[in-house]
């Protein structure tokens, strides 16, 4: 473990906070759909248990905690002017399948820790406006293939029209909400308005290798790449594996294999593009039956909106071509399409100052990963602090950070929040 940076401000650094952040991330990790792999999806029993624990920590910190109509956990303290726009510190509480320990969770528990510190200091430095800690119930889009549902319902990026989307078992968001104890007809109650928030700051692991290579615990995010998430359905014809000649087949799985390689080729041919097919199902699903149907996911990202749109069109064209040649039908259903999102110059400056105070210098990074900050950018200025992770590994159980870096993230978040408070 690396040593704590020597230049920590004694005002803002609290060694116990770093220990608590790491312990709480491990406690959240224990709330999983299966003991062998860390998985916590939207509107599940695990979501409920994690939300209860986070609410408890929020109350311990001095925040009033509630679950909103979308299943997000919102902690709030009003400050001296309860009607003023709030400063929001946030991240997400859901995970991918077989996840690492820190993606999302680190930001939530660090935000709670920073709120606790600000509340403890409020006799010396009163909070002039409300402070909210928000823990979003769905950022990853793992269950419903639509990312940012939690923060999207808060900001209006998503609305009731998405509730009919179904998970892989055919359960719609609306049905899952009812099963969870939420009322889908009231989803609009989760919506907050422009003017409710003055600024949004999120701590998140970098999920890439740059900070480690630079020998720095923290970085300042300047922008977040845009991404398209889609589900592709391929309809061919099921048949007997022994009797249908190769030339007469309409094999949906072979067509999908060709399509996946075409998607990879489109992304490789472009600059600043990545494309991933991370999940596939084939039916009816027997070794002696030609696949009649498949369904696979598409995740396409770029920092350049034009490049992303052009690549998506090219993928559509290539899939149509493959469909014609193989006599199968491709249908692409886009679940979400976000543009590249810029962080606010004032918050970038404020986070730079915080990083300089904590580690001597700041470093600017572009985020290839999606974050709740994308949704919040629709309502208020956003800023993000990235935290070094071992080997740049994320979306993988090997995801790891040091306690010292958690302490650095806490110190920087607190510093940045105090700057926002002092600037008013
Ligand atoms: C969120 O983790 C993403 O996939 O970008
Ligand atoms: Mn993630
Ligand atoms: Mn995340």
Image: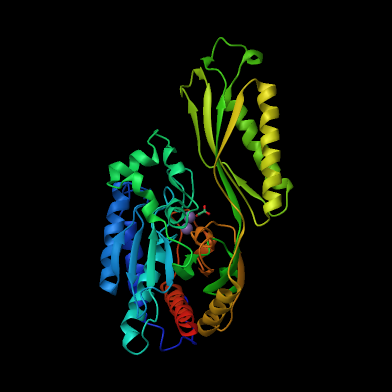
Q: Is residue 223 above or below residue 20?
A: above
**Does residue 120 appear left or right of residue 330 in this picture?**
left
**Does residue 183 appear left or right of residue 227 in this picture?**
left
Closer to the camera, 115 or 246? 115
- State the count of labels: 0
The picture places residue 29, in percent across and down from the top left corner, at 34, 57
For residue 251, what is the image quadrant? top right
Q: Is residue 27 above or below residue 20?
A: above
**Does residue 81 appear left or right of residue 412 in this picture?**
left
Residue furthest toward the front? Answer: 83
The picture places residue 253, in percent across and down from the top left corner, at 56, 27
The residue drawn where x is 56% and y is 84% is 360
Closer to the camera, 266 or 287? 266
The picture places residue 39, in percent across and down from the top left corner, at 38, 49
Q: Is residue 111 above or below residue 119?
A: above
The picture places residue 159, in percent across and down from the top left corner, at 45, 48
For residue 366, what is the image quadrant? bottom right
Closer to the camera, 405 or 103? 103
The residue drawn where x is 50% and y is 65% is 390
**In the rendered view, how is the structure colored?**
rainbow
Quarter occupied by the N terminus: bottom left
Residue furthest toward the top? Answer: 243
The residue drawn where x is 58% and y is 64% is 209
**Can residue 16 be seen by looking at this rendering?**
no
**Can residue 191 be seen by looking at this rendering?**
yes
């Amino acid at each position: 473990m690396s040593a704590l940076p020597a230049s920590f401000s004694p005002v803002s650094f609290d060694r116990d906070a770093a220990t608590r952040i790491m312990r709480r991330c491990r406690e959240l990790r224990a709330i999983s759909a299966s003991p062998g792999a860390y998985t916590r999806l939207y509107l599940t029993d695990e979501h409920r248990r994690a939300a209860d624990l986070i609410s408890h920590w929020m109350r311990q910190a001095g925040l009033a905690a509630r679950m909103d109509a979308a299943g997000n956990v919102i902690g709030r303290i009003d400050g001296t002017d309860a009607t003023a726009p709030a400063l929001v510190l946030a991240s997400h509480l859901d995970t991918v399948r077989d996840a690492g320990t820190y993606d999302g969770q680190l930001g939530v528990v660090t935000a709670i820790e920073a709120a606790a510190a600000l509340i403890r200091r409020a006799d010396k430095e009163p909070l002039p406006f409300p402070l909210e800690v928000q823990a979003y119930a769905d950022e990853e889009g793992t269950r419903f293939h639509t990312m940012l549902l939690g923060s999207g319902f808060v900001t209006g990026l998503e609305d009731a029209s998405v509730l009919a989307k179904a998970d892989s078992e055919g359960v719609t968001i609306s049905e899952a909400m009812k099963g969870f104890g939420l009322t889908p007809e009231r989803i609009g109650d989760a919506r907050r308005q422009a003017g409710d928030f003055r600024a949004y700051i999120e701590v998140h692991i970098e999920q890439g290798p740059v900070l480690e290579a630079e020998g720095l615990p923290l970085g300042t995010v300047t922008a977040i790449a845009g991404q398209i998430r889609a589900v592709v359905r391929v309809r061919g014809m099921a048949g007997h594996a022994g009797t249908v000649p190769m030339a007469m087949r309409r094999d949906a799985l072979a067509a999908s294999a060709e399509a996946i390689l075409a998607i990879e080729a489109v992304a490789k041919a472009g600059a600043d593009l990545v494309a991933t097919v991370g999940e596939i199902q084939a039916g009816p699903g027997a070794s002696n039956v030609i696949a009649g149907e498949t369904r696979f996911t598409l995740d396409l990202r770029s920092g350049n909106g034009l490049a992303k749109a052009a690549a998506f069109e090219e993928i559509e064209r290539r899939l149509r071509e493959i469909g014609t040649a193989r006599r199968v039908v491709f249908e692409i259903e886009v679940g979400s399409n976000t543009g590249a999102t810029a962080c606010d110059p004032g918050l970038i400056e404020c986070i730079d100052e915080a990083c300089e105070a904590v580690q001597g210098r700041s470093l600017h990074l572009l985020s290839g990963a999606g974050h709740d900050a994308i949704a919040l950018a629709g309502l208020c200025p956003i800023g993000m602090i990235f935290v070094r992770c071992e080997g740049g590994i994320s979306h993988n159980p090997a995801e790891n950070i040091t306690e010292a870096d958690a302490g650095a993230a806490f110190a920087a978040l607190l510093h940045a929040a105090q700057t926002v408070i002092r600037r008013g």
